[in-house]
Image (cartoon, rainbow, N blue to C red):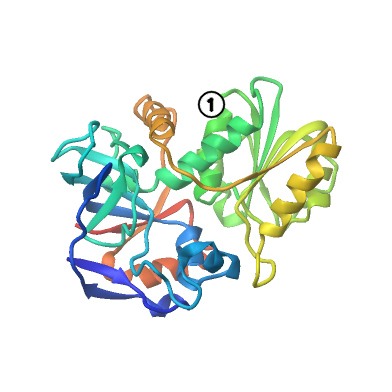
Amino acid sequence: MKAIVHDVYGPPDVMRLEEIDRPEPGPGEVLVRVRAAGVDPGVWHLMAGMPYAIRAAGFGLRAPKDRVRGLDVAGEVAAVGPGVTRFRTGDEVYGNAEGSFAEYARAKEGRLAPKPANLSFEEAAAVPVSGCTALKAVRDGGPLGAGRSVLVLGASGGVGSFAVQLAKNLGAHVTGVCSAGKADLVRSLGADEAVDYARADPTDGSRRHDLVLDAAGNRSLTALRRSLTADGTLVIIGGEGGGRWIGGNDRQLRAMLLSPFLRQRLRALAATVHHRDLLILTELIEAGSLRPAVDRTYPLAEVPDAVRHLREGRARGKLVVGVA
């Protein structure tokens, strides 16, 4: 089968299209014939091996243990391993897989769900990692509803575009922060306000919010807390920038250490995909209450270009790789 592989850490150019053996599903695993795969920041971190803590976490100190990148997947079940009960050959599924930048990928049964009937494979591939992360972020923020205020930093990105919609569906007043060129997208997703971060500082303390979701990853804890109400909740999603060793995750660590001593709640969130969360997202999508914002679809051979596009911050929503 064809797959995007890399044998060393580095920039997008280390990835190349190659013919490799098709994987076989093990116990509790599903083999997916990939029709589309999503591109998210986790792909870059694993490709670059940055920050170094990623390598120490078991992904390979000197070289990547797994040669094929890609997490988000949408496709058809090609085979099932022993013990799989939810799926059978031919089912259309979406979720999280090991190495989805390939014609076939293995996935744990608990990280897949039936594909939303009203989405294409390309649209479905944009949902799992970002959608599940946004869902957990909004849930961690406590009860939302009319009269509650939510600030989404990075509102035009993958996680942010879902978070805007989820918070608005719960009745909150949503302010999305993005660049001027993406304000129309953020408003179309339901945001009551779209703030251009180049013209105004949304964390200057002039307005306070019950929930702040930071999916942009570069503001200080002091600034983020300044935009919270006295008993508000901050959820930090991932982390960019920072040093080579732990990168932007230092803010998450400091937030968790500081939170027990404050009225404000400071939360750190890592991206995880689970069957039950995918089912919640599917219900919302099929009801017309949630939609993925897909910027562009790249062919498999152009994965390096897709990763570059993402890192340059030009994406409006999600980038997708069409495979089959």
Residue 184 pos. (x, y %): 54, 46
Residue at point 44% right, 67% down? 307
Mark 1 lies on a secondary structure that is helix
Which corner quadrant holds the C terminus?
bottom left
Residue at point 46% right, 70% down? 60
- Amino acid type at mark 1: Asn
- Res. 276 image quadrant: top left
Is 130 placed left or right of 37 in the picture? right
- Res. 288 image quadrant: top left
Residue at point 36% right, 75% down? 6
What residue would you read off at disc 1? 169
Dot 1 crowding, Cα within 10 Å, few <14, some 14–19, many 20+: some
- Res. 284 image quadrant: top left
Residue 260 pos. (x, y %): 81, 38
Image: 294 above or below 274:
below
Residue 222 in view of the camera: yes
